[in-house]
Amino acid sequence: MHVLDIFRFCPVCGSDRFTEHNEKSKHCDACGFTYYLNPSSATVALITNPQGELLVVRRKKNPAKDTLDLPGGFCDIGETAEEGVCREVMEETGLKVTRADYLFTVPNRYLYSGMTIPTMDQFFRCEVEDTSHVHAMDDAKDAQWLKPEDIRLEDFGLTSVRQGLARFLQEK
């Protein structure tokens, strides 16, 4: 189901004449309002320890429950991407990010509550205060350090994370 399919009535005037304008928008023929669906902002953290191992987490919830992932998640309203990645790393691993450098983005489609949400996943290379005190928390079932040669992309459940991780490993 396209996420715009659930919007049957215009949010401005309540008319049921709220129809598909194009792939990314709906238009109200009654009041003229057009709603554009833009991607949600999400972040992904690439964190390595002094041994060159990458921090990965196991997803506690769907989508892709029990598969590997990288720390990250959706940005909150009023939050920068840098603030979002720092908050998500803290929530999922207990690690405090001291530096977050933007690397690249990967567009994605994220299944949530039966709807496919378009996202723009922003990848950051992050440095943390202390790599020795990792604790899986929040959406992370567990956390571990993997040597680059032990990383198998097929173990990661989200398409954008596989794509971003492949790019990161290739450029490394």
Image (tube, grey):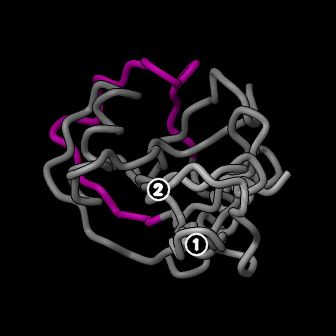
User: Which residue is painted at 52% across and 67% down in the image?
Assistant: 120
N-term-proximal mark, 2 vs 1: 2
Q: Residue furthest front?
A: 30
- The count of marks equals 2
Q: What residue appears at the point 61 percent right and 78 percent down from the top-left corner? A: 170
In this rendering, the label closer to the viewer, 2 or 1? 2
User: What's drawn in magenta, residue-wise?
Assistant: 122-146
Q: Secondary structure at mark 1?
A: strand
2 or 156: nearer the viewer? 2
**36 and 67: which one is in front?**
36
* The disc label shown at residue 12, or none: 2
Examine the rendering and report whether any part of residue 65 can be seen.
yes
Picture quarter containing residue 119?
bottom right
Residue 25's label in the rendered image is none
Q: Residue at x 75, y 68 (%)?
A: 19
Q: Residues within 10 Å of mark 2 (few under 14, many from 20)?
A: few
Is 155 a magenta residue? no
Check residue 141 for magenta coloring.
yes
At 51% across and 27% down in the image, what residue appears? 143
CA–CA distance in space, label 2 to label 1: 32 Å
Residue 105 horizontal side relative to residue 27, left or right: left
Cβ–Cβ under 8 Å for marks 2 and 1: no
Residue 156 showing in the rendered view: no
Where is residue 49 shown, x and y percent of the image?
A: 35, 47
* Residue 89 in which image quadrant: top left
Three-letter code, disc 1: Val
As displayed, is residue 146 above or below residue 30?
A: above
- Residue type, label 2: Val
Q: Is residue 49 above or below residue 41?
A: above
Mark 1 Cα-neighbour bin, 10 Å: few <14, some 14–19, many ≥20: some
Rendered location of residue 136, percent (x, y): 45, 20
Q: Disc 1 designates what residue?
A: 106
